[in-house]
């Protein structure tokens, strides 16, 4: 197969969500182009496609190597401050987001946006690409939700204008805006945006595309956070089915199983919840490692299910492990610590381990007081931000979500 055909075929496979196949096809193109000095830009392009496929397959180290090599080549051809290099950095931001490294992702995306903004028109699709990454990564960072919404609205406006209302990238941006609003606890707007994103993605990509599964995950999460478990369950089950095609250690596949397990736990389907949490935890450990904070939600979910099953010994084991993992981190929120200590105390009480329970009392009081103080400061901050936002609403258009 020629490298031209390999790149075309690989791109088509990628867009269909056939990531394992696209990785193999792009690897073939990379091998064909390696060492061909007259086709260095094509070699860099093939490496980018390869890295994007590897992100979906949770091959993060391999993806990093692909993007690093592509960036080196493009820097030599176009210059380190070129638009072409900045676009590679947007894929590196995607990789950082997949690895939950949001500060790094935001830094990469912001610098790339600034570089691209200097070299293209205000309504260029490259601006929309960069604004999308800045907005999405910023959504996960404290005090950047309004800024993120602004960037995502900018991306949405350009993509609607250039690509039309029904393009998959418009659906992708609506999904990102939905996440932004959900993180700001504006669930009514988040749900409306998420449902519209889902309809566009289903039409553009087909009902069983992994990107559709990602949107189903986000929607089901919003319903869970608002305790609407009846609405969440069919969405989560469909998401699990769609994402089952991905590798076991794909992040969205793990989180989708975890979300369905949470719903099963809430509805009293405890055996299914335990099976799902156990599978999700095993995959999370494989992806992130046994001591990574990204596995804590899996541990807590499994422990909570064990607690509801009256399996206090296993619940104790998983809550203890959650605390150990979190205590190793530089940032350990007092509210999260207080919740874990409370649950662990319950396990001790039900097992009549009163001595162990009493040893937790000082730490529990400390974490509660810190959490309450932090919560009061957070409430004041949110009140001020809300007031500022209301004033700004009179001064500028906040965006069209229709």
Image (cartoon, rainbow, N blue to C red):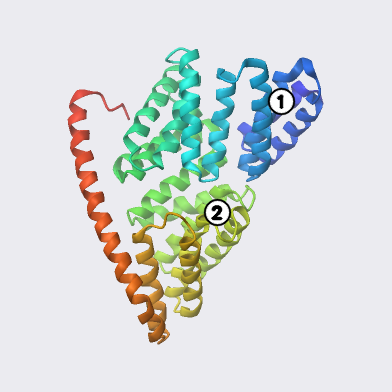
The residue under the point 70% across, 37% down is 23
Q: Are marks 2 and 1 in contact (CB under 8 Å)?
A: no
Above or below — where is 333 with respect to 385? below
Above or below — where is 127 with respect to 237? above
Query: What whole-number distance in Å separates the C-alpha atoms at marks 2 and 1?
Result: 30 Å
Residue 197 visible at all: no
Which residue is disc 1 drawn over? Answer: 7
Classify residue 210 by image quadrant.
top right
Number of numbered tags placed on the structure image: 2
Classify residue 344 by image quadrant.
bottom left
Drawn side of residue 389 relative to residue 61, left or right: left
The spot of residue 307 in percent (x, y) is 43, 74
Quick one: label 1, few (<14), some, or many (20+) residues within 10 Å? Answer: many
Instruction: Look at the image and tell me in which quarter the C terminus lies.
Output: top left
Secondary element at tag 1:
helix
Drawn side of residue 163 relative to residue 62, left or right: left
Which residue is disc 2 drawn over? Answer: 254
The residue under the point 46% across, 79% down is 312
The residue under the point 43% across, 60% down is 263
The residue under the point 74% across, 37% down is 24
Secondary element at tag 2:
helix
Is 234 in front, or is 354?
354
């Amino acid at each position: 197969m020629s490298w031209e055909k390999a790149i075309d075929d690989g791109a088509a496979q990628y867009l269909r969500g056939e990531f394992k196949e696209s990785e193999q096809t792009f690897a073939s193109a990379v091998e064909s182009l390696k060492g061909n000095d007259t086709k260095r830009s094509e070699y860099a392009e093939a490496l980018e496609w390869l890295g994007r496929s590897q992100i979906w397959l949770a091959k993060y180290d391999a993806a990093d190597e692909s993007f690093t090599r592509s960036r080196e080549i493009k820097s030599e051809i176009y210059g380190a401050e070129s638009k072409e290099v900045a676009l590679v950095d947007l894929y590196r931001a995607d990789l950082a987001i997949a690895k939950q490294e949001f500060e790094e992702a935001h830094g990469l995306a912001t610098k790339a946006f600034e570089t691209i903004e200097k070299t293209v028109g205000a309504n260029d699709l490259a601006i929309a690409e960069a604004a999308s990454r800045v907005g999405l990564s910023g959504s996960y960072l404290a005090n950047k939700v309004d800024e993120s919404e602004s960037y995502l609205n900018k991306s949405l406006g350009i993509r609607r204008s250039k690509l039309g209302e029904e393009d998959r990238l418009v659906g992708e941006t609506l999904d990102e805006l939905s996440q932004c609003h959900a993180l700001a606890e504006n669930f009514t707007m988040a749900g409306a945006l998420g449902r519209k994103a889902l309809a566009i993605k289903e039409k553009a990509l087909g009902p069983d595309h992994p990107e559709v599964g990602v949107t189903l995950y986000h929607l089901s999460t919003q319903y869970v956070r608002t305790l609407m478990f009846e609405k969440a369950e069919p969405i989560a089950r469909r998401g699990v089915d769609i994402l089952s095609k991905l590798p076991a250690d794909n992040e969205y596949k793990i989180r989708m199983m975890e979300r369905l397990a949470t719903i099963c736990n809430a509805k009293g389907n405890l055996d299914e919840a335990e099976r799902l949490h156990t599978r999700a935890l095993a995959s999370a450990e494989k992806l992130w490692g046994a001591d990574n904070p990204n596995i804590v939600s899996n541990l807590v979910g499994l422990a909570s299910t064990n607690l509801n099953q009256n399996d206090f010994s296993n619940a104790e084991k998983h809550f203890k492990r959650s605390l150990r993992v979190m205590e190793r981190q530089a940032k350990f929120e007092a509210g999260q610590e207080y919740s874990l200590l409370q649950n662990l105390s319950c396990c001790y009480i039900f097992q009549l381990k009163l001595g162990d329970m009493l040893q937790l009392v000082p730490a529990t009081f400390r974490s509660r007081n810190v959490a309450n103080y932090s919560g009061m400061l957070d409430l004041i901050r949110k009140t001020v931000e809300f007031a500022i936002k209301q004033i700004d609403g009179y001064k500028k258009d906040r965006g069209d979500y229709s």
